[in-house]
Amino acid sequence: SSSASISSPAFSRGLDSKMRYHLVYLHSQPLIYHGPDGQIYDVEPLNFAGEREKLIQTLKEAGKELVIRAEPATTENLRKVVTLGCRALHYTGHGLPNSLVFEDGKGGCHMLGARDLKGLFGAGGHAGRQRVKFVFVAACHSEAAGRAFVEAGVQHVIAVRLEEKVADQSPTIFMNQFYLALLVGHTIREAFEIGQNAVHGSPDIYAKADSTKFLLLPERGANHDVTIFDDLLPGDIQDLSPPRPPTNLYAVPEGFLGRNYEVHRVMHELIGRNSHRLVTLAGPEGIGKTSAALAAAHYLNQRAFFPDGILYVDLPQARREAAMTATTASSTATPLAILVRALLNGLRAAAMSVSSSSSSSSAAAPSTSKKSPSMGVGY
């Protein structure tokens, strides 16, 4: 997780009750989409965690008192941050010629067309729209979405040409150099040129060709020779992103790829319209049952579906320990009783581990609900 500091409720320079954040970072990574042929396909994964870490490091290097927020790109979150107020909005995800790919809140795609994007963003009057000075649409084919933001009243927008795709690393290279230049006092046009040249100067031959694919909109009638962060005081960045619920989950194996459909199916059984309190994954040993459960649990935890957290229990180990205890205490323990005892003991141990880890972290936030749900993952 990021080492950025967590802010106090006090407003920072340039912020007030009508402007909550300097920069909001919305990231979209749905698991599946329904193709025009009716089939379900995996969505290509993007490395948002790595991109966000690099961005935060860049922002910290600028040494400015910048208030940021990062969360999944849903239409609800987009409208929320516009209503609360942010000076700059950054979207990163997949783009299509006529739409941006948002998350539907349940692991699927929500294709948001340019007209709907303009209506969603532009609702509420001119004064609200004017608070967002700048939008960066870091997605392939995002020109139409960028122009929709312009039509909704945003003065400065960066997007990718309609007919173009860019290499995965190109937006990250551009983004880091662009925001660093903005924060140290360069104008939007100067920062844009710095970002372009950073991509062109990259040793990666695939990224090198992408420097001319970025657009600064609108091309005419706008004065991009302005600064937007020149009023920030020296200091630390303040991260107001929603805190992650506590967890003791292991990392998903690096080779676990191309299984989004299975991961989405697990999620659907847990949080879908006809959700279940217990979901069991069955199959031969070694086909990836544990990895699928871990991937689903991580996705849910990153989006705080279970505010009290997600616990991982190694059932084989817990069952061996429970069996040894049962053998010592009583010779009449049934296999079911041993399994139940193993699960309870494992949950207690996992909960104690998570509680200890959370209490030692200064960034941990208290639960907002006395009965907010939690989830357990057993293997």
Image (spheres, helix red, strand yellow):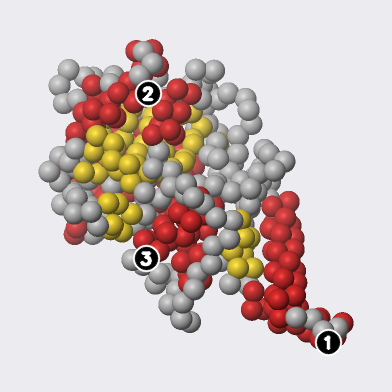
Q: Which of the two residues, 312 or 197, is positioned nearer the viewer here? A: 312
Residue at numbered disc 1: 331
Which residue type carries mark 1? Ser
3 or 1: mark nearer the eye: 1
Other residues around mark 3 within 10 Å, as few (<14) / some (14–19) / many (≥20): some
N-term-proximal mark, 3 vs 2 = 2
| Residue located farthest toward the left when viewing the structure as drawn | 163
Up/down of 19 relative to 49, above or below = above
**Numbered badge on residue 211:** none
The alpha-carbon separation of the residues under discs 1 and 2 comes to 70 Å
Which quadrant of the view contains residue 258? bottom left
Residue 375 image position (x, y, % from top left): 61, 56
What residue is disc 3 on?
Answer: 259
The CA span between labels 3 and 1 is 43 Å
Give the mark nearer the N terminus: 3 vs 1: 3
Which element is circle 2 on? Answer: loop
Residue in the picture at 60% in, 39% down: 6
Q: Are marks 1 and 2 in contact (CB under 8 Å)?
A: no
